[in-house]
Amino acid sequence: MPHVDPRSIIYVAGLTGAVMAVVLWGVRRNLPVAMPGVPAWSMAPLLCAASTVFFSLDQRLPGFVVMLAGNALLMGGLGLFYFGSLRFWHRPCPWRSWTAAGAALLAAMSYFCWFQPDFRARTMLFAVGMAACNFAHARLLQRHGKGFSSRLTAIVLAALCGVSVLRAATTFWLDAPASTRFTQMPMQQLYAVSFHLAALLLSIGGLLMLSERVRFEFEHMASHDSLTGALTRRTLFQTGEREWTRWMRHGRPFSVLLLDIDRFKSINDQWGHPTGDKVLQGCTALIASRLRGGDALGRYGGEEFIVVLGETDGAAAWMAAERIRQALEQHRAPDIPAYTASIGVATVAEGDAGFGSLLKRADMGLYQAKAAGSNRSVAQ
């Protein structure tokens, strides 16, 4: 790359960084809900762009000012990308320790700029420090990130980490103590291009991760009840139809529980609707805690819930219903009245015409449980 002017690289990188900062800021302001980490992502490319302003003023400003301000801003930008990802994925953010490490790194680089000028030492220190930050960032996304956007961003960070390590390993061989960041040398140009291109790609990665999160939130809102977090009636019926298809194709049994909170109207009348909502939420959480990973819990309407138990025969379904019923009966919570539930149980059998007919049998069981005094499970 000897024909590429490093200053041109810096100018273009600064412009694209500023544009990405504006884009991220605009997206942040128009999000339907606030998302952690996005403010840091919005500021990161702006700091990277600001660093290019100082680097482009080399030989116009004192070299120490350019080195200190430019590298501090670039470090801050890449650090904010990392801190934003930590918050986005709900991980602890040890910003104090990273800030202290960055300050120590800048102090060491200042020594090799002011007291013992050596471009090679400064390059090695900065490259090693940024490699550590980018490695930690890539590891975070590899462990906790989900989807294509996280993988893409992790690949960009891993590539940048590799270039940084290579630059640190070769600087004492390729450079002289008086070299500059604008030295016409392929390795230095690759190093400069990788850092400023990474700022652009990391911004794009953040936008993609944000897009995936927004899509997930909307899909979750469409498939889950807003009050209880249980599946909506439509989504639950889709689950039931899938289980019915498996039964028809492979003969794998499944069961349905139809649960109704006993005398729920009196709870609303005596305690108020906010307390009734807490009862519904607590009931949902308690039922979910008694289910297996592959079971599905949905809100059928009002105070009624449906549980779809995959790979479950009649005896196991009745035992599951009793575990849930007893847990609800014994559960006590402050500021919430005691309550019980009646449960109808039905297991798929020959003669059923579909998931709807199975649910109808569970409803008959629930009706019988109510008629017999409530707070009991009846299988049909």
Image: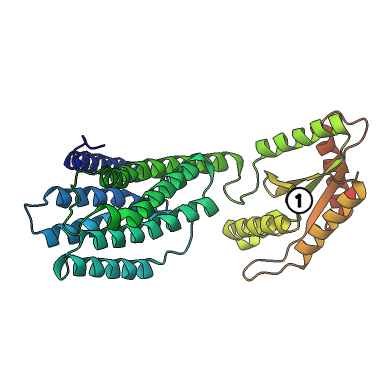
Q: Position of residue 363 (x, y in %)?
A: 82, 42
Q: Position of residue 151 (x, y in %)?
A: 50, 44
Q: Position of residue 40 (x, y in %)?
A: 34, 54
Per the image, the residue denoted by label 1 is 260
Residue shown at 83% from the left, 54% from the top: 320
Q: Quadrant of the rendered structure where residue 121 is?
A: bottom left
Residue shown at 27% from the left, 42% from the top: 186
Residue shown at 33% from the left, 69% from the top: 101
Instruction: Tell me the kind of residue under disc 1.
Output: Asp
Q: Position of residue 98 (x, y in %)?
A: 36, 66
Residue shown at 25% from the left, 39% from the top: 16
Q: Secondary structure at mark 1?
A: strand
Q: Split into 4 quadrants, where in the image is the C terminus?
A: top right
Task: Say if 199 sits above or below 338 in the image.
Answer: above
Q: Split into 4 quadrants, where in the image is the N terminus?
A: top left
> Crowding near pointer 1: few (<14 within 10 Å), some, many (20+)?
many
Can residue 336 be seen here? The reply is yes
Can residue 80 be seen here? The reply is no
In this picture, residue 244 sits left or right of residue 197: right
